[in-house]
Image (spheres, helix red, strand yellow):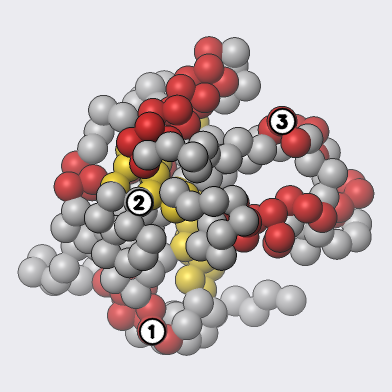
Amino acid sequence: KLCEAPYNKTVDWAKWYIFWADERVVAKNHSDSNYKLAKDGILSKVPIVPSHVHSINDSVSAEEAADEYMFVIRQLVKTRMVSVSDISDCPKFDLILLGMGPDGHIASLFPNHAVLEETDEWVTFITDSPKPPPERITFTLPVINSASNVAIVVTGESKAEAVHLAIDNVEPNCPSLPARLVQPTKGKLVWFLDKPAASKLDDLQFSEQG
């Protein structure tokens, strides 16, 4: 709806800075590119300032891309374009928008992957993603949990079990999903689910949205 009237005219797009919580290290016009998805879906349809759109360098390795992306964010923190959490010293983004896979992964933080233990870096990388493409960069959990707002959007019955395990109080021996580790320290977490994705929740209260 942000692409439609009245929002495309009334939103102050000059105040928007866009980053990617995770990205596949592929060309920007590749069908797997999250940049392409965002550009086609919204960025090409609203008057956002081009220099405020911070995509990764896709011409280098995943490690180099992650290092460069973290440098860009650090520079914006230094100039106070991006604020800092007073708890974690991580960048404090206004909103981080995430999806979730059937395995409960968010961003490029996959179950049982060493990247979940990364606490020193703001941005890290993987070269062995369980789903293609293998090379990706991703925000780390401390950065995600430092945001003012985190929204997780999930659709489809194939993700219903993961939604249940991530949200409901489950037994200690149930698998720990990355999505369950999203716990903003001083922010707000909101889940947006369609009916199939929410079908296995213990206490279902569904709000219809027009």
Amino acid of disc 1: Ser
Q: Which residue is mark 1?
A: 158
Q: Which residue is mark 3?
A: 51
**Residue 200: mark:** none
Compared with residue 64, is residue 158 higher up or lower down, i.e. above or below? below
Quick one: SS at disc 3?
A: helix
Q: Earlier in the sequence, mark 3 or mark 2?
A: 3
Quick one: SS at disc 1?
A: helix
Amino acid of disc 2: Glu
- Is residue 196 in sight in this rendering? yes
- Characterize the local packing of mark 3: few (<14), some (14-19) or many (20 or more) Cα atoms within 10 angstroms: few
**Residue 135: mark:** 2
Q: Residue at x 38, y 61 (%)?
A: 133
What distance separates the C-alpha of mark 1 from that of mark 2? 25 Å
Q: Residue at x 25, y 55 (%)?
A: 128
What distance separates the C-alpha of mark 1 from that of mark 3? 38 Å
- Characterize the local packing of mark 1: few (<14), some (14-19) or many (20 or more) Cα atoms within 10 angstroms: few
Q: Please state, as top left, top right, bottom left or bottom right, where the C terminus lies in the image.
A: bottom right
Residue closer to the observer: 154 or 24:
24
- Is residue 180 in sight in this rendering? no
